[in-house]
Amino acid sequence: MELKQSHSVRLNDGHLMPMLGFGTYAPDHTPKSKAGEATKVAIDVGFHHIDAAFFYQNEEELGRAIREKIADGTVKREDIFYTTKLWTTFFRPELVRPALERSLKKLQLDYVDLFIIHNPLAMKSGEELLPKDASGNIIFDTVDLRDTWEALEKCKDAGLTKSIGVSNFNRKLLELILNKPGLKYKPTCNQVECHPYLNQSKLLEFCKSKDIVLVAYSALASHRDPNWMDPDSPYLLEEPTLKSIAKKHNRSPGQVVLRYQLQWGVVVLAKSFSEKRIRENFQVFDFELTPEDMQAIDGLNRNFRYAKLQLLVIDSSSMSSKPLGHCESAVLSREGGWI
């Protein structure tokens, strides 16, 4: 892929997605205003792909930031590629469009560019982000993901979103959607954890074969939110191989990691609320890793996941999602996807 010529990839529905995106998730202790401030900096720097979600609870701030940058002439609405995600408590088909309309109201925008299923594990409907029973256990729901997908298709037809996709899906779950009777639109993308310690090579190969773009989150593995990551996890950017390659190119390890993903044809999300780091993360289009560099980074793969999330399997009798035990989940995790 020649990145010097284009910084975007064409999705299977014809729309263009910038290959480098700005992530907006922040831990609970971070003021919501920080996300808005950082988004304005990111747009000024050149990030036009803004990745967000209802679950992040900061879309009012993000919408305000985007509208301010439009108002001051920095960008036009059509320059911005905005992604939001359908949270797991809104999987019932009748809740899908209202969930998207709620995000649009918070954003004060007429449409989003991409609307994706946040993860394939349905939870009890309601206002609680993480509904739990008296014992503190998550309350799950039984929803056919194909029905949820059909509701996303209707959102696209209504003009509320230009494209639709999924996140945290493995090959089996992607095939569930792709083989859905009466499928109108294929997923344009699949957003998953992806970095040199988890390069998702098999899932990437499958997605490319189906014209589905792989989007990498936790690409830098730099956030240490204890709710989602084991504090004892290794520091990716301290990896000697990455530091050596970075020194050779007079770059930072983070820039090397982002460039590595881009050269594989992966859309990559870079998240930082530091102005210095935001600027640094965008400077990845003016150098190229050698085949030897790419091979060395490939060799770092250890199928290591930073995100501490539950796995699921497809119940063949009802085609609904249900939580798995550790033994069963390991079978699916080797394929990549829901992590």
Image: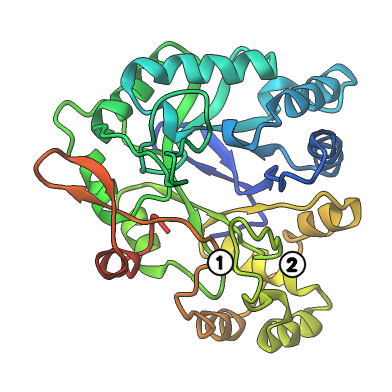
| Residue at x 49% of width, y 40% of height | 10
Which of the 4 image quarters holds residue 203?
A: bottom left
Density class for disc 2 (Cα within 10 Å; few <14, some 14-19, many ≥20) is many
| Residue at x 43% of width, y 35% of height | 88
Task: List x then y, in percent, for residue 276.
Answer: 90, 56
Q: Earlier in the sequence, mark 2 or mark 1?
A: 2
Q: Is residue 45 above or below residue 195?
A: above
Disc 2 residue type? Gln
Disc 1 residue type? Tyr
Q: CA distance from mark 2 to mark 1?
A: 19 Å
Q: Nearer the viewer, residue 277 or 296?
A: 277
For residue 189, say whether it is visible: no
Task: List x then y, in percent, for residue 41.
Answer: 87, 40
Q: Nearer the viewer, residue 127 or 155?
A: 127
Q: Which residue occupies the extreme front position in the image?
A: 134
Q: For marks 2 and 1, give the one nearer the viewer.
A: 1
Q: Which residue occupies the extreme left position in the image?
A: 317
Task: List x then y, in percent, for residue 179.
Answer: 17, 40
Residue of label 2: 255
Residue of label 1: 306
Q: How is the image coloured?
A: rainbow
